[in-house]
Amino acid sequence: MSTNIKITRICEFCQNEFIAKTTKTQYCSLKCSSRAYKARTRKSKIDESNRQTEIARQPHLEAVKTKDFLSVNQASLLFGISRRTIYRIISRGELDIAKFGARTVIRKCDMDTFFSMPLEQSLLRPVQEFPGLENCYTISQIQQKFGISPGALYMLIQRQGIAKYSVGKFNYVAKKDIDIIFNVREK
């Protein structure tokens, strides 16, 4: 059975106009059809090679994706953030962990939940208003008054989540926050 259909089409490979005899014809000639097939084959080989290279670069990533519990190294690999950032999130109390000796284990669903929260809730804390110089200690004043080393003071300020204010070349901390930590009674 033959048809006398003549449809004007555009070749999907060379983009030239041609007359097709069926509605499914895509290419103007066998030459364009062969070239399109070779281009598709080449592209699929390149895509497969790139996928294999990505797996070779990060061999553990595929295995990590299937786990329910992650170490800090695995979580940093999976989420593309540094180990130190994960430890900071943990120290702020925004991520639940389990400790097995020295090993820290994080549930993957907790990490997913943390990163699905809006940025305002997870990372940004309300900024405290500067109480004024008369209501603040400098870092050196705190060290002298309470006899604490600089490193211990900075760790204490960080651990307690106390706001520091930079004015000029000095760092200030609110007197009320420091007095609460060192149990100073008001006179």
Image: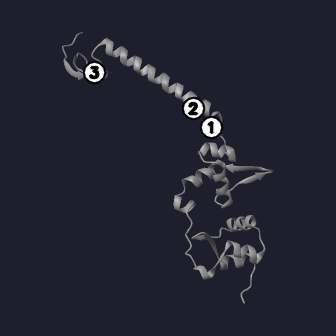
The answer to whether one can see residue 63 in this image is yes
Question: Could you tell me which secondary element the residue under label 2 belongs to?
Answer: helix
Tag 3: Cα neighbours inside 10 Å, few (<14), some, or many (≥20)? some
Q: Which residue corresponds to the image point at 69% horizontal and 68% vertical from the top-left? A: 157
Q: CA distance from mark 3 to mark 1?
A: 42 Å
Q: Nearer the viewer, residue 94 or 136?
A: 136
Residue position marked by numbered label 2 in the rendering: 54
Which residue appears at 22% of the width and 10% of the height?
A: 2
Along the polypeptide, which appears first: circle 2 or circle 1?
2
Residue 130 at x, y percent in the picture = 56, 76
How far apart, in angstroms, are the residues tagged by discs 3 and 2? 35 Å
Q: Is residue 109 above or below residue 65?
A: below
Q: Secondary structure at mark 3?
A: loop
The residue at which mark 3 appears reads as: 11
Inspect the image, locate mark 2, and give the three-letter code of the amino acid beneath it.
Glu
Q: Which residue is mark 1?
A: 61
Q: Nearer the viewer, mark 2 or mark 1?
A: 2
Do the residues bearing badges 3 and 2 touch, measured as CB atoms within 8 Å?
A: no
Q: At 63% across and 48% down in the image, what residue appears?
A: 82
Q: Nearer the viewer, mark 3 or mark 2?
A: 2
The image position of residue 120, as x and y in percent, is: 52, 62
Q: Earlier in the sequence, mark 3 or mark 1?
A: 3
Res 77 label: none
Task: Pick out the residue farthest to the top.
Answer: 1
Q: Is residue 38 above or below residue 147?
A: above
Query: Is disc 1 placed on a helix, strand or loop?
Result: helix
Residue 169 on image: x %, y %: 60, 69
Amino acid type, label 1: Leu
Q: Amino acid at mark 3?
A: Cys
- Whether pointer 3 and pointer 1 mark residues with C-beta atoms closer than 8 Å, the reply is no
